[in-house]
């Protein structure tokens, strides 16, 4: 018999959950759509029934479900168990998740911003084990970030700290969905890579990217990655450009925080070999020498599991099973 935690990664389109034992081994997992159109209470109901189904499976072979950890996008007031607002979950404004989930399951729920969960997962079992000062960035459709200082999430006065993706790196840059301009997210995400490709296709001569899709609008960041693997010069140039902008963002973080490590995850980090050289070069050129030498830039070790493991770690902390 072995007790377990349920870790959940809630996104705008689906949620993933898994049973995690006290050492962080991931057991059964599930994957369900977020049917936002049915309303937030219905989504919460789906979440609870999925947790119950997962726990039922686990209980036949393992011990008890001790707690639930949930990572959710947006501004989370973790002390109160509330989603304050979330661009990916429309209508979830000051929405109390903890009270109904704890009432339904009879065990504690810990909730935290999803990028912070990713950082905690890497701290517990990934690329930042034993590192007390670091930043973790998820390079996906957008750019998420978590800052860990002295072994704890840096939440700031309103719980909104760590929005690394909205650090401004170009004063009159691309408009961002946050309402500002020139945010890192507009230059170092999958969305940015696709946009760089579409812009370059208008002027660039021969490139595999032109042959991949009949309709350029269908081009994806994955296509650019595939072309880079075939040494297409335009695709390689796009990743170098993205790598440079990422380096500017990391330079700001390194100069501000003097962190020991920067962990990069998310789908775009899969293209590591094509952007990291330019990122490191920019940091070496632009950051203060001593903190730049200190800050190791490393790839996430947990991949897709990072958020779930971080949420599980948070739940373990809540019930006093880890320090
Ligand atoms: Zn922004």
Image: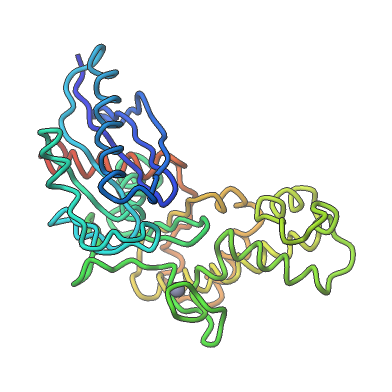
Q: Quadrant of ligand 1?
A: bottom left
Residue for point 73% across, 65% down: 237
Residue for point 51% across, 87% down: 171
Of all residues, the one furthest to the right in this rendering is 206
Q: Is residue 251 left or right of residue 134?
A: right
Q: Is residue 1 left or right of residue 196?
A: left
Viewer-proximal residue, 60 or 280? 60
Q: Is residue 301 left or right of residue 38?
A: right
Residue for point 25% across, 24% down: 55
Q: Position of residue 75 (x, y in %)?
A: 28, 63
Circle count: 0
In which quadrant of the rendered image does the C terminus lie?
top left
Q: Position of residue 54 (x, y in %)?
A: 30, 25
Q: Is residue 37 left or right of residue 82?
A: right
Which quarter of the picture shows residue 69?
A: top left
Q: Is 257 drawn above or below residue 6 in the view shown?
A: below
Q: Position of residue 116 (x, y in %)?
A: 31, 55
Viewer-proximal residue, 318 or 202? 202
Viewer-proximal residue, 236 or 218? 218
In which quadrant of the rendered image does the N terminus lie?
top left
The coloring applied to the image is: rainbow
Which quarter of the picture shows residue 196?
A: bottom right
Q: Is 167 drawn above or below residue 269 in the view shown?
A: below
Q: Position of residue 297 (x, y in %)?
A: 48, 57
Of all residues, the one furthest to the bottom in this rendering is 172
Which quarter of the picture shows residue 242?
A: bottom right
Residue for point 41% across, 46% down: 127
């Amino acid at each position: 018999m072995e007790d377990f935690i349920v870790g959940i990664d809630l996104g705008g389109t689906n949620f993933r959950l898994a049973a995690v034992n006290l050492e962080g081994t991931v057991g059964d997992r599930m994957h369900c759509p977020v049917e936002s159109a049915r309303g937030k209470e219905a989504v919460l109901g789906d979440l609870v029934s999925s947790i119950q189904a997962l726990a039922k499976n686990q209980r036949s072979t393992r011990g008890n479900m001790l707690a639930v950890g949930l990572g959710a996008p947006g501004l989370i007031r973790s002390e109160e168990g509330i989603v304050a607002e979330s661009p990916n979950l429309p209508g979830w404004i000051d929405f109390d998740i903890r009270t109904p989930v704890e009432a339904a399951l009879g065990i504690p729920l810990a909730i935290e911003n999803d990028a912070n969960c990713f950082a905690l997962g890497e701290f517990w079992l990934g690329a930042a084990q034993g590192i007390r000062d670091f930043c973790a960035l998820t390079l996906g459709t957008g750019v998420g970030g978590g800052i860990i200082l002295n072994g704890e999430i840096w939440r700031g006065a309103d719980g909104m700290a760590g929005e690394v993706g909205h650090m401004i790196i170009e004063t009159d840059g691309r408009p961002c969905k946050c309402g500002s301009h020139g945010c890192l997210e507009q230059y170092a995400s999958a969305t940015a890579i696709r946009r760089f490709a579409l812009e370059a296709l208008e002027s660039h001569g021969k490139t595999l990217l032109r042959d991949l899709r009949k309709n350029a609008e269908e081009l994806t960041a994955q296509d650019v990655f595939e072309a880079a693997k075939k040494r297409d010069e335009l695709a390689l140039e796009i990743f170098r450009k993205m790598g440079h902008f990422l380096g500017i963002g990391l330079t700001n973080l390194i100069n501000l925080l003097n962190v020991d490590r920067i962990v990069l995850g998310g789908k775009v980090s899969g293209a590591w070999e094509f952007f990291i050289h330019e990122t490191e070069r920019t940091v070496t050129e632009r950051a203060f020498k001593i903190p730049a030498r200190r800050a190791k830039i490393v790839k996430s070790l947990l991949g897709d599991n990072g958020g779930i493991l971080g949420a599980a770690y948070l739940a373990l902390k809540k019930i006093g099973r880890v320090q």
